[in-house]
Image (cartoon, rainbow, N blue to C red):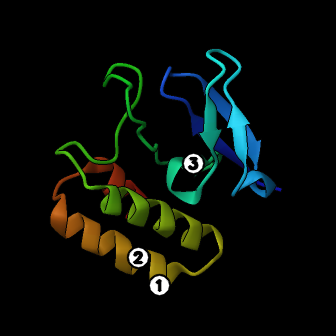
């Protein structure tokens, strides 16, 4: 079973099972409750990184550097989920749309490949 990476606002990275989607986890560092959703997690074996709110550029690489909307973040997560579900054409279509909105973004380019 693939694991997911979840990042708390305090910067703590946690590995959670896919079966945790839709549940709420607790950060071991700060004790915050964090909803575990497809749009705020990333597969632990993916070659792309998923930025989190409240973390500096020094501690994480964000897939969107020019202020993405929540909808774009959700779409990025959806495309990653589609990729791991082996629905490559659908994932690529979303990554292509995001590439048009955020040209020359290395994380989106990496995800596309």
Mark 1 Cα-neighbour bin, 10 Å: few <14, some 14–19, many ≥20: few
Q: Is residue 73 left or right of residue 16?
A: left
Q: Looking at the picture, how far across and down is residue 11, in whole percent?
A: 50, 22
Mark drawn on residue 73:
none
Q: Is residue 98 above or below residue 53?
A: below
Element under disc 1: helix
**Which secondary structure lies at badge 3?**
strand
In the rendered image, residue 80, in percent from the top left (x then y), is placed at 52, 63
Q: Which disc number belongs to residue 41?
A: 3
Q: Residue furthest top?
A: 29
Mark 2 crowdedness (10 Å alpha carbons): few <14, some 14-19, many ≥20? some
Give whichever of discs 1 and 3 has the lower sequence position: 3
Measuring from the top left, give residue 106's x and y in whole percent. 29, 49
Residue placed at 66% from the left, 25% from the top? 27
Q: Residue at x 18, y 54 (%)?
A: 104
**Which residue is nearer to you in this view: 25 or 5?**
25
Left/right placement of residue 32 relative to residue 70 reads: right
Label 1–label 3 contact, CB within 8 A: no
Quarter of the picture holding the N terminus: bottom right
Mark 1 lies on residue: 89
| Side of 9 relative to 12 (left or right) | left
Asked if labels 2 and 1 touch by Cβ distance under 8 angstroms, the answer is yes
Which mark, by number, is residue 92? 2
Q: Quadrant of the C terminus?
A: bottom left
Q: Earlier in the sequence, mark 2 or mark 3?
A: 3
Q: Residue sitting at 63 percent across and 67 percent down?
A: 84
Furthest toward the right, the residue is: 1
What is the spatial separation of the Cα atoms under label 1 and label 3, in whole angstroms?
A: 21 Å
Picture coordinates of residue 85 (x, y %)? 65, 74
Q: Nearer the viewer, mark 1 or mark 3?
A: 3
In the rendered structure, the answer to whether residue 104 lies left or right of residue 14 reads left
| Quarter where residue 108 is shown | bottom left
């Amino acid at each position: 079973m693939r694991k997911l990476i979840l990042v708390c606002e305090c910067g703590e990275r946690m590995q959670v099972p896919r079966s945790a989607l839709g549940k709420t986890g607790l950060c071991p560092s700060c004790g915050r409750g964090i909803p575990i959703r497809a749009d705020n997690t990333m597969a632990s074996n993916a070659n792309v990184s998923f930025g989190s709110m409240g973390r500096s550029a020094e501690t994480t690489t964000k897939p969107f550097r020019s202020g993405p909307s929540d909808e774009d973040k959700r779409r990025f997560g959806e495309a990653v989920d589609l990729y791991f579900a082996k629905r490559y054409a659908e994932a690529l279509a979303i990554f292509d749309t995001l590439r048009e909105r955020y040209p020359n973004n290395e994380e989106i380019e990496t995800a596309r490949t």
